Amino acid sequence: MEPVVVLILFAMFLGALSQRVTGMGFGLVSGPFLVLLLDPFSGVILVNICGIVASFSVFVRTSAEVEWPPFRHLALGAVIGTIPGALLSSSMPTPPLQILIGALIIVSLISSLTLGKLGRTIPANIGTRLTAGLFSGAMSAAAGAGGPAVSAYAVLTNWEQRSFAATLQPFLVVGTASAVVMKVIIDGGTWPHLELGAWIGLGLVLVAGLAGGDWLSRHIDVGAARIGMLVLAFGGGIAALAKGLLAFV
């Protein structure tokens, strides 16, 4: 097996592990590394495809706690947001897009970390949900990471963590599926070209990552898991940003 395929599978395993333990993080953890290992176009598509599977698997176990009215508003915004996100990513050359993806992920992570410390809130209504969904859909199509936008919304509206994490799963399924469809419509050449064995391997590591995350979630503090996810995500975002910048040196 080629080294790059092994690295792709490892990135996917870490992403699935994070998704099961923390409720999000698949795109944040695996996305930046796949952008480096493949390219900004097929890398984001691959993250979105596997992210759908990961989110749906978690949703099956947490569906009873989903808040459906907020889900519908957020999902509508996400579907609309994938259009400008896909148009933006398809119109940019590789180095600037790598810079954009790295910067978006870093800014999103920093925003998610700092918003909670400001002590400010916004109303939880259809307008704020549509706006959060719009940004999430655009981020999903452009960078394969739609979670931070709705995570920031949850912080600003004081959304209870368990119901938010449960509602996030079907939302990510809809948002990432819309991103895949929109990117294929706008630029059909972005579909990742992997051998059959690599696709089978992806399926196996997704199952392994989710199963491992299920076990780990019962034996590790969620706060510690989030710190690990953030460290990996920051590292990937910085690496993608650096690779794009180095192309201009």
Image: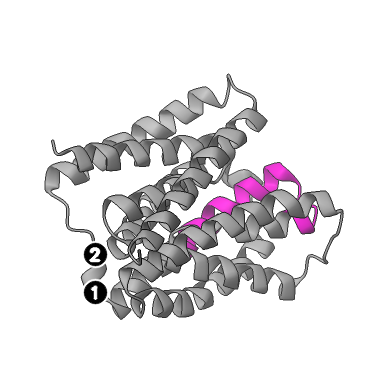
Please, which colouring scheme is shown? Answer: one colour
The answer to whether residue 113 is above or below residue 130 is: above
Question: Picture coordinates of residue 204 (x, y %)?
Answer: 27, 35
As helix, strand or loop, the secondary structure at mark 1 comes to helix
Residue 166 visible, this angle:
yes
| Residue closer to the observer: 45 or 73 | 45
Q: Is residue 45 above or below residue 225?
A: below
| Image spot of residue 114 (x, y percent) | 74, 52
Q: How many marks?
A: 2
Q: For residue 143, which quarter of the picture? A: bottom left
Q: Secondary structure at mark 2?
A: loop
Magenta span: predominant SS is helix
On residue 188, which mark appears? 1
Is 238 on the left or on the right of 110, as rendered?
A: left
| Magenta stretch encompasses residue 170 | yes
- Residue type, mark 1 in image: Gly
Q: Is residue 219 magenta?
A: no
Q: Which one is nearer the viewer's eye here, 65 or 97?
A: 97
Quadrant of the frame with the C terminus: bottom left
**In the rendered view of the protein, which quadrant contains the N terminus?**
top left
- Find residue 219 and report its horizontal and vertical position in percent: 58, 19
Disc 2 crowd, CA 10 A, few/some/many (<14, 14-19, 20+): some
Left or right: 136, with 249 as reference point: right
Q: Residue at x 37, y 48 (%)?
A: 33
Identify the magenta region. 155-175
For image coordinates 29% across by 72% down, the residue present is 184
Residue at 23%, 59% (x, y): give it: 192
Q: Amino acid at mark 2?
A: Trp
State if disc 2 and disc 1 touch (CB < 8 Å): yes
Give the labeled residue for mark 2. 191
